[in-house]
Image (cartoon, rainbow, N blue to C red):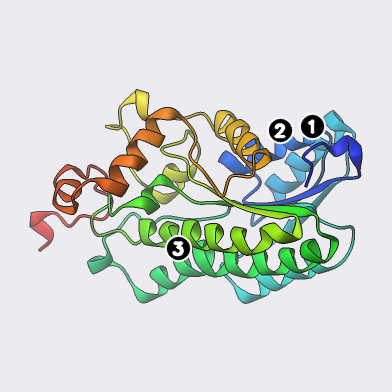
Amino acid sequence: MTLDPATAERRALITGATAGIGAAFSRRLAADGWHLVLVARDAGRLTELAAELGSRSGREVETMSADLSTDDGCATVEQRLAGGSPVHLLINNAGISLNKPFLRSSAEDEARLLRLNVHAVMRLTLAALRPMTERRDGAVINVSSVAGFGAVMPGSTYSASKAWVTNFSESVGQSARPFGVRVMALCPGYTRTEFHQRAGINMSKTPEWMWLRAEDVVDEALRDLGKGKLVSIPAWKYKVAVAGLRHAPRRLLQAVARDTRGRIGRDER
């Protein structure tokens, strides 16, 4: 697959397109000359972003309002991937975290997290790969997280869902490669987006040096996709962190885990 839209009428479908990393992908790809299909729940924000990108780039910008934590929402996007103008790049960016420990969570909330972070990623990847492998052209970027490389959030199930995304993408990427199709897991660290705010997670104590810019994450992701990487970890500091997560003793990881969104305080026990 070529990432140069000048060689063909390239079209990218981006979920969670109106905020954070999804919005950064939308703006970067529009500037690079891609046609876009933007997917998000908020129809108003979709319309605003589509108008902005369409007028600025002169490219086609479709919008789809869909809740990917539901079967109907997934089915709507699956149908678009299977029909209409071909989609050459799928970016599965939509995802959530929960600002509560598993022992204080509910089956409904945990199921919604899994439907969005895992089930939707699986369904849309499968729907995209069928026509891509037939054409022997295309790519999928599944937005995961460095959190998926270790249990760095005691009591949270978010990191487990992202471990699945990374493993899934790496495995499927190997099987799709002989067909000229790429699948890559994008594993950023803490990134300046609306993600934590929407989840009600207080990140005020996170050191400034740990934060990434969404635009920089997107730039490195597209470079790594062009290189054929199966896993992209933006920024050297997080490459080092992942090496530590992969090889450090589990007891050490448990002792230094700092993300406390899933912990239960002593007064809650």
Q: Position of residue 236 (x, y in %)?
A: 43, 29
The residue that mark 3 highlights is 164
Q: Neighbour class for label 2 at 10 Å: few (<14), some, many (≥20)?
A: some
In the rendered structure, which amino acid carries the disc numbered 1?
Asp
Tags 2 and 3 touching, CB below 8 Å: no
Point out the image quarter for the C terminus: bottom left
Tags 1 and 2 touching, CB below 8 Å: yes
Residue in the foreground of this view, choosing between 30 and 232: 232
The residue that mark 1 highlights is 32
The residue that mark 2 highlights is 28
- Give the image quarter of residue 78: bottom right
Q: Position of residue 12 (x, y in %)?
A: 77, 48
In three-dimensional space, the C-alpha distance between marks 1 and 3, rounded to whole angstroms, equals 31 Å
Q: Position of residue 142 (x, y in %)?
A: 58, 53
Q: Is residue 39 visible?
A: no
Element at label 1: loop
Write the residue at 68% across / 39% down.
226
Q: Identify the residue at the far top of this view.
A: 209
Q: Earlier in the sequence, mark 2 or mark 3?
A: 2
Is 27 situated left or right of 200 in this image? right
Is 253 situated left or right of 65 in this image? left
Write the residue at 41% across / 50% down.
199
Q: Position of residue 231 (x, y in %)?
A: 52, 47
Q: Earlier in the sequence, mark 1 or mark 3?
A: 1
In three-dimensional space, the C-alpha distance between marks 1 and 2, rounded to whole angstroms, equals 6 Å
